[in-house]
């Protein structure tokens, strides 16, 4: 029977082709897609998240592991849907208006996806009303905002205000190099995360599945 520890290790090593091969093998042996996802892919991505937090691996390793994760996910997605396996929650994610930085945001996306959440990535330079629209359309529990410029940080406050004004029951989390916990408190965000891996713990905690 396919060994999920080997799949996790292969993902950590970033070997995309081997990950796809192992996922295919496991499916062919009759293993359930949920088990492959949780014990293989997510387990591997969790290790990457922990190592990234501890500065034991860096952005390139995370991107390579995430690419391997995608290769596995592609093979599983249809089967997961058919088996009625639902993501643990939905997160709308974007970089705020006026801000074009997306490397950190994309990492957050990969980590959240790797953590079993559905991510609706609405890109960069996102105005407040677009966050509201996407949250409404997707029924997200969380809206995650990224900003890399001190000049665009006020846009986070705008987006949070717009979500509150729209009466949406979503939690908001923020992050990005110039962002701090005290800024999050000041603008009424529900959470702040200093890095992509912590964003997963924070999102799960706010959704109540941590
Ligand atoms: Co820009 N830039 N940039 N830039 N850029 C910075 C941010 C800057 C610090 C460089 C500097 O001056 N030392 C500075 C900002 C100063 C400030 O305001 N404090 C700056 C500036 C000034 C500018 C321009 C204004 C430059 C100009 O044109 N004069 C301009 C602005 C454009 C705009 O956005 N309107 C600009 C443009 C650019 C490029 C387009 C050239 C490019 C972006 C390419 C891209 O993203 N596709 C760029 C880059 C690459 C950088 C630096 C070099 C690297 C940013 C990065 O990707 N880091 C950056 C200097 C630096 O940080 N060393 C700089 C890696 C990434 C993994 O980290 O994004 O912090 P980061 O994400 C982390 C965490 O912050 C967190 O998780 C990630 C991983 O752990 N995180 C979240 C991020 N978002 C989160 C959301 C969450 C949770 C966690 O949700 C809950």
Image (tube, rainbow, N blue to C red):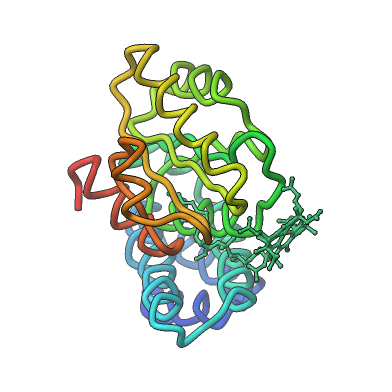
> Residue 20's quadrant in the figure?
bottom right
Q: Is residue 174 above or below residue 138?
A: below
Decide if residue 162 is on the left or right side of residue 71. Answer: left
| Place of residue 142 in the rendered image (x, y in percent of width and height, measured from the top left) | 36, 35
Q: Is residue 135 above or below residue 57?
A: above
Decide if residue 195 is on the left or right side of residue 126. Answer: left
Nearer to the camera, 50 or 113 = 50
| Place of residue 162 in the rendered image (x, y in percent of width and height, measured from the top left) | 44, 19
Q: How many marks?
A: 0
Residue depicted at 67% across the width and 40% down the height: 124
> Residue 89's quadrant in the figure?
top left
> Residue 13's quadrant in the figure?
bottom right
Q: Quadrant of the N terminus?
A: bottom left
Q: Is residue 7 above or below residue 121?
A: below
Nearer to the camera, 7 or 186 = 186
Decide if residue 158 is on the left or right side of residue 15. Answer: left
User: Ligand 1 falls in which quarter?
Assistant: bottom right
Is residue 86 at all visible to an observer of this figure?
no
| Place of residue 126 in the rendered image (x, y in percent of width and height, measured from the top left) | 63, 31
Residue depicted at 61% across the width and 76% down the height: 18
Decide if residue 107 is on the left or right side of residue 196. Answer: right
| Place of residue 59 in the rendered image (x, y in percent of width and height, measured from the top left) | 60, 74
Q: Is residue 1 above or below residue 54?
A: above
Looking at the image, the residue that sits furthest to the bottom is 56
Residue depicted at 28% across the width and 40% down the height: 190
Residue depicted at 27% across the width and 49% down the height: 204
Nearer to the camera, 47 or 180 = 180
Is residue 5 at all visible to an observer of this figure?
yes
């Amino acid at each position: 029977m396919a060994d999920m520890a080997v799949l996790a290790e292969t993902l950590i090593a970033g070997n995309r082709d081997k990950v796809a091969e192992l996922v295919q093998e496991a499916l062919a042996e009759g293993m359930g897609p949920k088990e492959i996802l949780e014990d293989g892919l997510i387990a591997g991505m969790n290790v990457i998240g922990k190592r990234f937090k501890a500065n034991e691996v860096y952005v390139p390793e995370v991107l390579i592991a995430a690419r391997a994760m995608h290769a596995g996910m592609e093979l599983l997605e249809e089967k997961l849907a058919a088996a009625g396996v639902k993501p643990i929650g939905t997160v709308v994610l974007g970089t705020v208006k006026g801000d074009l930085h997306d490397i950190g945001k994309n990492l957050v996306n990969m980590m959240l996806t790797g953590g079993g959440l559905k991510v609706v990535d609405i890109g960069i330079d996102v105005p407040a009303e677009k966050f509201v629209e996407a949250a409404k359309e997707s029924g997200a529990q969380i809206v995650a905002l990224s900003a890399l410029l001190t000049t665009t940080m006020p846009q986070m406050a705008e987006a949070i205000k717009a979500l509150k004004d729209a009466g949406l029951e979503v939690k908001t989390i923020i992050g990005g190099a110039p962002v701090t916990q005290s800024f999050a408190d000041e603008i009424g965000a529900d959470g702040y995360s200093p890095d992509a891996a912590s964003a997963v713990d924070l999102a799960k905690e706010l959704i109540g599945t941590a």
